[in-house]
Amino acid sequence: MWTVYSMLRTCLNLNKNVDISKYHKLQAFLKRNSTGYQPKKSKILDDSQINKFLNEANDQCYLRIKVILIMGYSGAMRRDELTKMVIDDIQFKEDCIHVQIPKTKNNVSRLFVITKQTWISIIQKYVALRPFNVSKRFFLTYRNGRCITSPIGINKIGQVPRVIAQFLQLLNPCLYTGHCFRRSSATHLADCGGDLLTIKKHGGWKSSAVAESYVEQYFFSLVKCEYGLLVSH
């Protein structure tokens, strides 16, 4: 009902200059009918599943997907943010990688740092394969162990969690959607002792309720914060 309401609100506002968001009785009716509704959320990847994919997947086929996983999980990135990432957003330091996310949904710029050396090596391997004098977009089409000039789109980025789930033979891979990386990252940070303010900064959430909704409502058993990567400002 909220979906239909949203479409009607937009159409009526554009075509008839009528704003039904000010209809308080309609708002109250929708809220009453949505009581108890539990929206479907993307399933998450835990640290053991992430490590298994990064260690076992063949770089010839999955190198780009590995880098998308590392970036998306490390920075709690949206698929749109991953799509718009450019090579200039990434700075290689002596023992870490700094990644800037300047273009976000709510215009809150974020920065995260990757310090795990095996992950850095995977990213460096991908960067070395990118051809020169092409689009600045970071993620390019990857085939048969090499990058070609055309950048990949948002829908392709959004399918990456499902591809990973299929490789790991997880149940219901279609439930691993484009929000998988953000939910996985927020949940891991919470499991490692991150408070709500830290989680909000990490994901760029302004609302505490929205940030809490991204954290899976159970703790992974014996999770250890071993990556040293969830650093955000």
Image (cartoon, rainbow, N blue to C red):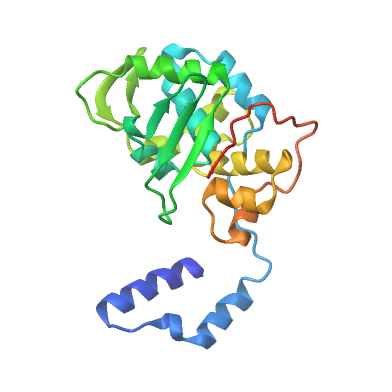
Instruction: Determine the residue positioned at 53% across, 20% down.
Output: 119
Which residue is most to the left? 133
In x, y percent, where is residue 25?
53, 87
Is residue 83 visible in this depiction of the protein?
A: yes
In the picture, measured across the screen, residue 39 lies left or right of residue 7, that is: right
In x, y percent, where is residue 201?
56, 50
Question: How many numbered discs?
Answer: 0
Between 86 and 45, the one lying in front of the other is 86
In the picture, measured across the screen, residue 23 lies left or right of residue 191, that is: left
Instruction: Determine the residue positioned at 55% across, 17% down.
Output: 117
Q: To which quarter of the image does residue 38 belong?
A: bottom right
Between 148 and 194, the one lying in front of the other is 194
Between 83 and 228, the one lying in front of the other is 228
- 74 shown above or below 11: above
Q: To which quarter of the image does residue 188 belong?
A: top right
Instruction: Determine the residue positioned at 36% across, 40% down.
Output: 154
Which residue is most to the right? 222
In x, y percent, where is residue 47?
66, 29
Between 179 and 26, the one lying in front of the other is 179
